């Protein structure tokens, strides 16, 4: 019996090919053209709604950007990742993308489809800050480059009427979160405390400046009185 993912009820191995997939260089030397068309208007899973909808749209946008930089195996694997709802598998932002199940799958079987998919959810894995991380070094060894360039024009040349998801994403991101979100509440509390501390510091600075002003006026007054005494 295959293992089931406790979060969304999908097979953990649903997107794993029985044949081990091999990585290819980036850019892809032999892309499948025309590419497999994956459109947000023709969902491969029930429309999730809410913030999951944003993640769903993000992985489809990422595919359209990279479809003409993928082999046929890449394109089919990417579709299988969508159908297995890997976009719903939240990663712990405090622990980083390594908490996402695709992270370990990439380490065991690096493919461009999985890397692009995970990059859509965790963009930090494709950005090198200073020295590459061990994970990034492994991906560079597999793909030669982990820079994800935009090839949307190539996709649109085969599908000029493809609908992009940017407007919908903006609406989803503006929606208030549903249910309790302790991290958000903690962040708000931290900001409120910081504002209170700033107000207290501002009051203290204003009082100090007022006192310094009074002292300066008194010194000036004393100086004038001494000058008048000298000439009286």
Image (cartoon, rainbow, N blue to C red):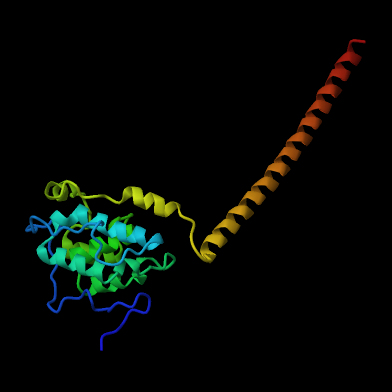
Q: Quadrant of the N terminus?
A: bottom left
Q: Nearer the viewer, residue 161 or 18?
A: 161
Q: If the image is split into quadrants, where does the C terminus sit?
A: top right
Q: Is residue 7 above or below residue 175?
A: below
Q: Residue at x 13, y 70 (%)?
A: 22
**Residue at 28 percent of width and 64 percent of height:** 118
Q: Is residue 136 above or below residue 107?
A: above
Q: Tell me which residue sits at (66%, 50%) in the image.
A: 196
Hey, which quadrant is residue 112 in on the image?
bottom left
Q: Is 134 situated left or right of 199 in this image?
A: left
Residue drawn at the location 25% of the way across and 56% of the way down: 41
Where is residue 13? Give x, y as percent. Answer: 24, 79
Task: Give percent across and percent down for residue 81.
Answer: 24, 69
In the image, farthest residue toward the top: 231
Left or right of 23 in this view: 55: right
- Report x, y in % for residue 84: 26, 72
Query: Residue 5: x percent and y percent?
Result: 33, 79
Residue 3 appears left or right of 153: right
Residue furthest to the bottom: 1
> In which image quadrant can residue 111 be found?
bottom left
């Amino acid at each position: 019996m295959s293992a089931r993912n406790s979060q969304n009820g999908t097979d953990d191995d649903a997107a794993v090919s029985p044949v081990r997939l091999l990585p290819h260089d980036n850019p892809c030397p032999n892309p499948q053209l025309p590419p497999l068309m994956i459109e947000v208007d023709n969902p491969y899973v029930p429309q999730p709604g809410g913030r999951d909808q944003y993640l769903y749209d993000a992985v489809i946008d990422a595919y359209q950007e990279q479809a003409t930089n993928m082999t046929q195996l890449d394109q089919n694997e990417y579709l299988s990742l969508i159908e297995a709802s890997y976009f719903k598998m939240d990663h712990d932002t405090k622990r980083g993308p390594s908490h996402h199940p695709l992270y370990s799958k990439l380490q065991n079987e690096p493919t461009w489809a999985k890397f692009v998919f995970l990059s859509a959810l965790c963009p930090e894995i494709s950005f090198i800050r200073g020295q590459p991380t061990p994970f990034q070094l492994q991906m560079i060894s597999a793909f030669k480059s982990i820079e994800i360039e935009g090839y949307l024009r190539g996709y649109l040349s085969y599908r000029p009427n493809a609908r992009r998801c940017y407007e919908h994403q903006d609406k989803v991101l503006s929606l208030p979160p549903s249910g309790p979100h302790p991290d958000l509440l903690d962040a708000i509390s931290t900001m409120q405390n910081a504002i209170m501390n700033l107000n207290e510091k501002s009051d203290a600075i204003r009082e100090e400046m007022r006192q310094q002003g009074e002292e300066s006026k008194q010194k000036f007054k004393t100086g004038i009185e001494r000058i008048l005494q000298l000439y009286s």
